[in-house]
Image (cartoon, grey):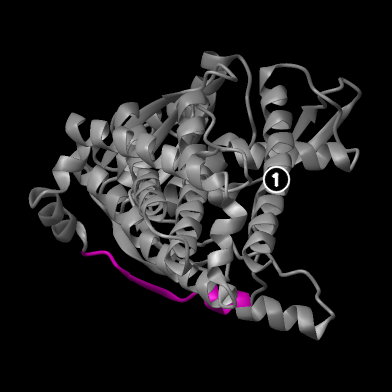
Amino acid sequence: MTERPAPAKLELLVRREDDEGFEVREVGSAVGFINSRPHRIAPESFELAEMTSRVAGERRYILKNTVTDRFLLLTAHEKFLWELMDGRASLQELATAYVLQFGEFDFEIIPSLIRKLQRAQLLTLQPTSRLRRALAKNRRRRIVNAVETTLFGLERIVVASREVQPFFQRLHRWGGFLLFTWGAAVACAALAVVGALAAAALWHDLDGVMAGFGGSAVRAIITVKLLFFGSLAAHQLVHGLACVHYRRRVREFGFTFLHGFVPTFFVDVTDIFMTSRRARVVTAVSGALVHLVLGAVWFIAAARAPAGFFQAFATASGIIQWQALVVSLYPFCFIEMDGYHVLVDALGVPTLKHDALRYAGKLLRGRARMRRGREAALWIGYVVLSALSVAAFVAFNVWVIVKATA
């Protein structure tokens, strides 16, 4: 039996960035041969939408596979390469065109882009292998392993359906479209004003109002939370209706455990990214307005009710609904909620949270120096504001619980 030859490889002698000597970079020739002439899928099978960054001055693009509903975020450099992947240009020709266009060459961009496009099935040539998952860190404590295993198991609990587009279309046709009219906007604003006045009146005697719980405060708070959980379903339904209103498709609707322990409903409206910014903003904000309306209704009911259990219950329900409104629309809380998506869409920086946390982590570990410029200022501002906001949120909730149980 003959010995299997070692895989071929290319070694390039490259000058270092600091101009102090050279280094050898190894490029696997097998991958280069397999993907020598990448060929993107047919034009009718993908969509491309532009997203301009107002912070870094960069153009980014969202590429969608309309067959599999996979989405990718491309830089301007990656878009340039994508447009050349017509099945006729070889990897060498792609690299040459890249150098002529940008005056430099990135050794990782072409193979990285090809792998990314293959995973999203945006190239007709299927990959021969997939990247293996990173090995988990060595965990010696059994309790930590048990907790992690439990949370991982809960995250895998998903009750959902991908055949929901007809349902949302019928719901929109049967009256859901009215939510996106000027009349609905005016009614929502009027209800918010009346609800705010009622909330202000209740706030002046909050201690007396909360005293209406008597000895059943804990049970009442649990019931309020359960009712609030039901409102999350309405929140997601309105997101889906907005997506259908702008003639895009709702991909999935269901129930899961967020972060492994928070039960919640979800709706996949990522198809809205292929339309206008106005549509994306309306889709994001409309769901959060459910909490504005419900909170206002609860406050109005509490203001009209006599002192007692129901008034306390309605007031607590109004507080948690408006708190959900703030959390949904406030972008600085380390959670990618509706307001966060509106912010990153307006700024054109879809990876703001990831970039900000990575930059702050490097600063804290001493692996990076403080940078100047609007982008670095945005990263630091996001981390600082989010940390302060989370602290304020926790403090407010502790205060409300103390008031209710006092």
Of residues 209 and 160, the one drawn nearer to the viewer in this rendering: 209
Whether residue 161 appears in magenta in the rendering, the answer is: yes
Magenta extent:
151-163
Q: Quadrant of residue 5?
A: bottom right
Residue at coordinates 22% horizontally, 43% vertically from top-left? Answer: 248
Residue 150, position as x, y percentages in the image:
62, 80
Left or right of 40 in this view: 170? left
Q: Residues within 10 Å of mark 1 (few under 14, many from 20)?
A: few
The type of residue carrying mark 1 is Ala
Residue at coordinates 89% horizontally, 43% vertically from top-left? Answer: 365
Residue sticking out furthest to the front = 306
Q: Quadrant of residue 254?
A: bottom left
Residue at coordinates 45% horizontally, 43% vertically from top-left? Answer: 338
The C terminus, quarter of image: bottom right
The N terminus, quarter of image: bottom right
Q: Is residue 1 above or below residue 137?
A: below
Whether residue 238 appears in magenta in the rendering, the answer is: no
Q: Can you identify the residue that label 1 sits on? A: 392
Residue 274 visible to the viewer:
no
Of residues 269 and 12, the one drawn nearer to the viewer in this rendering: 269
Residue 249, position as x, y percentages in the image:
23, 49
Residue 151 visible to the viewer:
yes
Residue 370, position as x, y percentages in the image:
84, 25
Residue 342, position as x, y percentages in the image:
45, 34
Residue at coordinates 78% horizontally, 83% vertically from top-left? Answer: 143
Of residues 392 and 92, the one drawn nearer to the viewer in this rendering: 392
Of residues 56 and 320, the one drawn nearer to the viewer in this rendering: 320
Q: Is residue 317 above or below residue 248?
A: below
Left or right of 221 in this view: 167? left
Q: In which quarter of the image is residue 292?
A: top left
- Check disc 1 and report its element: helix, strand or loop: helix
